[in-house]
Amino acid sequence: MREQVAIFLHIIGHNVKFRVIGSRYYRSIETIHRYFRVVLKAILKLYKLAIRLPDEPTPSEIRNNTRFYPYFKDCIGALDGTHFRASVPLSIKGRFRSRKYGTTQNVLAAITFNLKFFDVLAGWEGSAHDSCILSDALSRPRGLRILEGKYYLADAGYDIRNGCITLYRGV
Ligand SMILES: *[C@@H]1O[C@H](CO)[C@@H](O)[C@H](O)[C@H]1NC(C)=O
């Protein structure tokens, strides 16, 4: 059990290939693969315990600041896409090629003002548009939830819609 957790942390902490980890821990790649999945599933089960909607109506970072309050009282955080290096089969590599960063996944993350991750959607191709990934996150049964009247701040890669306010261009 401990070994499985150690292997999992080693992989996600240092981005090490299963093959390399296998030789380090004297295990086959299949075993490493299985251990990784077991621990990943266990961690995902913690979601309900660890991740909660903030229970105050307005984040204190906004309420405490007269520059922001009351204008942004319904803002609950910020969201953006970020690119992670991806190793994918040659046949689908083109779709994962992003404009700036090589072969990547485009990962959407929503955070609160005290820098806690509220939602992450991984797996989209690096070439996918931010606003299209946000639509996907919002349409999934267990995807990103934004309460009626609340919204996130986002950059110009997103469009203004319910739940998301972007920059006013040129200002
Ligand atoms: C906002 O003010 C309250 C009450 O003074 C304080 O407890 C809280 O830590 C403050 N939050 C921030 C982010 O400054």
Image: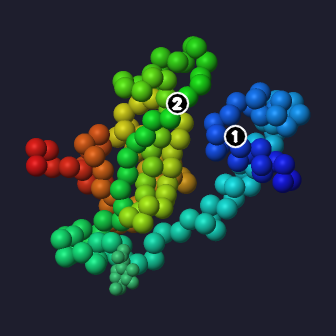
- Ranked by sequence position, the earlier of labels 1 and 2 is 1
Q: How is the image coloured?
A: rainbow
Question: Residue placed farthest to the front in the image?
Answer: 24
When the figure is inspected, residue 47 is found, relative to residue 24, above or below; the finding is below
Amino acid on which the number 2 mark rests in the picture: Arg
Residue 33 in percent (x, y) is at 78, 36
The residue type indicated by label 1 comes to Ile
Q: Is residue 131 above or below residue 41?
A: above
Residue corresponding to mark 1: 11
> In this view of the protein, which residue sits in the foreground, 21 or 97?
21
**Percent x, y of residue 65:** 24, 75
Residue 36 horizontal/vertical position (percent): 76, 42
Q: Quadrant of residue 14?
A: top right
Picture residue at 78% right of the left edge, 51% below the top = 5
Percent position of residue 127, x then y: 41, 26
Quarter of the view holding residue 17:
top right
Residue 65 shown left or right of residue 136 in the figure: left
For the residue labelled by badge 1, is the local secondary structure a helix, a strand or a loop? helix
- Can residue 163 be seen in this snapshot? no
